[in-house]
Image: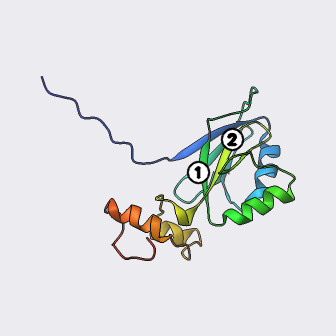
Amino acid sequence: MSESRKARAVGLNHIALEVGDIDEALAFYRRLFDFELRGRSGTSAFIDLGDQFLALQKGWTGGADNGRHFGLVVDDKDAVRQALSDAGIQPLPGRFLDFLDPWGNRIEIVGYDNIQFTKAPAVLRGMGLEHLSKTEKAIKELADKGMVASGSRDT
């Protein structure tokens, strides 16, 4: 009997968040982030993240996320911290920069420079973010997995 091949998970194409109202959700997220829309309908909107996207779907039924969350990678974590403050949004307690949107979606803000996650140079260029680089620790983590040339300053 032959063993069936399993597909390998290679990344995320998108994350879908339920919100109460698409216009309100777009207004909320525009207070915090600079982004382009990939598309939109009456019941959904798609925030472009280069080769990925964040889908906002109308259909929220209530209840805030507690431990369930996703990490949104940004080019400037301090700018998000300031935008949250300017919008009167209190980050959640803990060592990470987490917050809840008005529909209870928990979002953790993660700086691009300090994690293994990386975008291909062509994607960064297309997003106007070719200036981004990684910390030595993140480069080592990537290099240890054979994902960046050892000693490289960025990906």
The residue at which mark 1 appears reads as 53
| Residue 18 numbered tag | none
Q: Is residue 47 above or below residue 149?
A: above
The residue lying toward the viewer, choosing from 63 and 141, is 141
Callout 2 secondary element: strand
The residue lying toward the viewer, choosing from 71 and 93, is 93
Which one is closest to the eye, mark 2 or mark 1? 2
Residue 35 locus on image (x, y percent): 69, 60
- Residue most extreme to the left: 1
Residue 16 locus on image (x, y percent): 62, 40
Residue 131 locus on image (x, y percent): 56, 77
Q: Is residue 149 above or below residue 56?
A: below
- Residue at x 33% of width, y 72% of height: 149
The residue at which mark 2 appears reads as 106
Who comes first in sequence, dot 2 or dot 1?
A: 1
Crowd rating for badge 1 (residues with CA inside 10 Å; few <14, some 14–19, many 20+):
some
- Residue most extreme to the top: 1
Q: How is the image coloured?
A: rainbow
What amino acid type should be assigned to the residue bearing mark 1? Phe
Q: Quadrant of residue 127?
A: bottom right
Q: Quadrant of the C terminus?
A: bottom left
Q: Quadrant of the N terminus?
A: top left
- Residue at x 86% of width, y 59% of height: 86
Q: Is residue 105 above or below residue 117?
A: above
Q: Is residue 60 above or below residue 36?
A: above
How far, Cα to Cα, is label 2 from label 1?
Answer: 17 Å
- Residue at x 46% of width, y 64% of height: 138
User: CB of mark 2 within 8 Å of CB of mark 1?
Assistant: no
Crowd rating for badge 2 (residues with CA inside 10 Å; few <14, some 14–19, many 20+):
many
What amino acid type should be assigned to the residue bearing mark 2? Arg
Callout 1 secondary element: strand
Residue 120 locus on image (x, y percent): 45, 65
